[in-house]
């Protein structure tokens, strides 16, 4: 009887059912790697991309337009030298654009009086420049570089008495390559000297580049107290006037001592090639596919 009861109890107690074996689930597919956003190529020290406001030396500033690049004096000298140019050591900056290239230099000659603004003789100035260039070509020959020739005026010298801007543009021809470049010179008179601004552009692109250059000039200003109108008695005064700014003035004295004080410039690099140029700026020699860059100006006759 006891055996029968045990058997009955064994059937009465339910046995816990084992859960059904679930089929193995495939592992979820790995998420595709998230693409890292491409970083913009870092500019070398001293370079600024527009739009921005930058210092042009210690006494001026410039509003850099969008898509333009500005390099300080060190960058300007590096780029000029990499392109085979001579430097003046007065460089304050370089502006690079698809429209052209602009060099900024400051000559601390003092306050330049504009008493001769109504007597600028373009023909006489061109003759003086050509005479000085022949002397400078001897120096270029010694350096193993082709001579330069001034073929004429693209824009004759003229002065704006309101803005105190002196402007002129000779066409400079490289005797070795035959290439011609317009050096559109603007001299912005200040209290302590002259900001020398030079647009470099080929003659055929000059008209297209001029509106951009004008807009750039409108973004330039001397800092407070350094503009032409801030002159006060006792400030340093230059020993020459406007005409000498075109033909070289007192710089001729230094030039005849073996120094090239003022330098003509040739086109450097277009903005399209600037990416590679930046990488090479402080590295190897620039591999510009453009024209040979010669940057020399004669000892000028005052």
Image: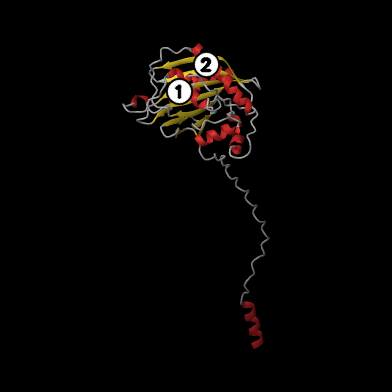
Along the line of sight, which residue is nearer the eye, 218 or 33? 218
For the residue labelled by badge 2, is the local secondary structure a helix, a strand or a loop? helix
Of the residues tagged 1 and 2, which is closer to the observer?
A: 2
Q: Secondary structure at mark 1?
A: strand
Residue 119 appears in the figure: yes
Q: Residue furthest left?
A: 233
| Residue assigned mark 2 | 128
Spatial CA distance of label 1 from label 2 is 19 Å
Report the residue at 62% width, 50% height from top: 31
**Few, some or many C-alpha atoms within 10 Å of disc 2 (few <14, some 14-19, many ≥20)?**
some
Q: Nearer the viewer, residue 78 or 69?
A: 78
The residue located at (60%, 38%) in the rendering is: 279
Residue corresponding to mark 1? 187
On screen, residue 27 above or below 281: below
Question: Residue 214 in the image: x percent, y percent?
Answer: 47, 22
Question: In which quarter of the view is residue 280 placed?
Answer: top right
Asked if labels 2 and 1 touch by Cβ distance under 8 angstroms, the answer is no
Q: In this orientation, does residue 202 appear?
A: no
Residue 185 point in image, percent of width and height:
50, 21
- Which quarter of the figure has residue 281? top right
Mark 1 or mark 2: which comes first in sequence? 2
Classify 10 Å Cα crowding around label 1: few (below 14), some (14-19), many (20 and above). many
Give the quadrant of the N terminus.
bottom right
Q: Position of residue 62 (x, y in %)?
A: 44, 30
Query: In this rendering, is residue 98 above or below 158?
Result: below
Point out the residue furthest to the bottom here: 1
Residue 106, image x, y percentages: 46, 29
* In the image, residue 5 above or below residue 222: below
């Amino acid at each position: 009887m006891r055996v029968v009861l045990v058997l009955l109890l064994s059937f009465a107690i339910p046995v816990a059912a084992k859960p059904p074996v679930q089929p193995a689930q495939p592992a979820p597919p790995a998420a595709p790697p998230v693409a890292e956003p491409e970083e913009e190529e870092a500019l070398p020290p001293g370079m600024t991309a527009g739009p921005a406001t930058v210092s042009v030396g210690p006494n001026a500033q410039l509003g850099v337009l969008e898509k333009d690049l500005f390099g300080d004096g060190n960058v300007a000298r590096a780029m000029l030298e990499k392109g085979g140019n001579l430097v003046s050591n007065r460089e304050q900056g370089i502006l690079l654009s698809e429209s052209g290239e602009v060099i900024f230099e400051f000559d601390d000659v003092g306050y330049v009086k504009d008493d001769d603004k109504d007597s600028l003789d373009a023909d006489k100035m061109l003759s003086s420049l050509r005479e000085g260039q022949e002397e400078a070509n001897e120096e270029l020959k010694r350096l193993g570089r082709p001579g330069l020739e001034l073929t004429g005026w693209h824009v004759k010298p003229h002065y704006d008495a309101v803005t105190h801007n002196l402007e002129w543009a000779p066409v400079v021809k490289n005797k070795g390559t035959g290439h011609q470049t317009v050096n559109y010179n603007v001299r912005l008179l200040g209290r302590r000297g002259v900001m020398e601004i030079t647009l470099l552009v080929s003659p055929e692109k000059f008209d297209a580049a001029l509106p951009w250059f004008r807009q750039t000039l409108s973004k330039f200003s001397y800092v407070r107290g350094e503009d032409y109108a801030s002159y006060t008695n006792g400030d340093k005064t230059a020993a020459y006037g406007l005409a000498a700014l075109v033909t070289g003035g007192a710089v001729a004295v230094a030039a005849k001592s073996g120094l090239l004080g003022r330098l003509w410039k040739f086109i450097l690099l277009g903005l399209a090639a600037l990416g590679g140029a930046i990488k090479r700026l402080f590295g190897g020699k620039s591999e510009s596919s453009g024209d040979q860059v010669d940057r020399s100006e004669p000892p000028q006759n005052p």
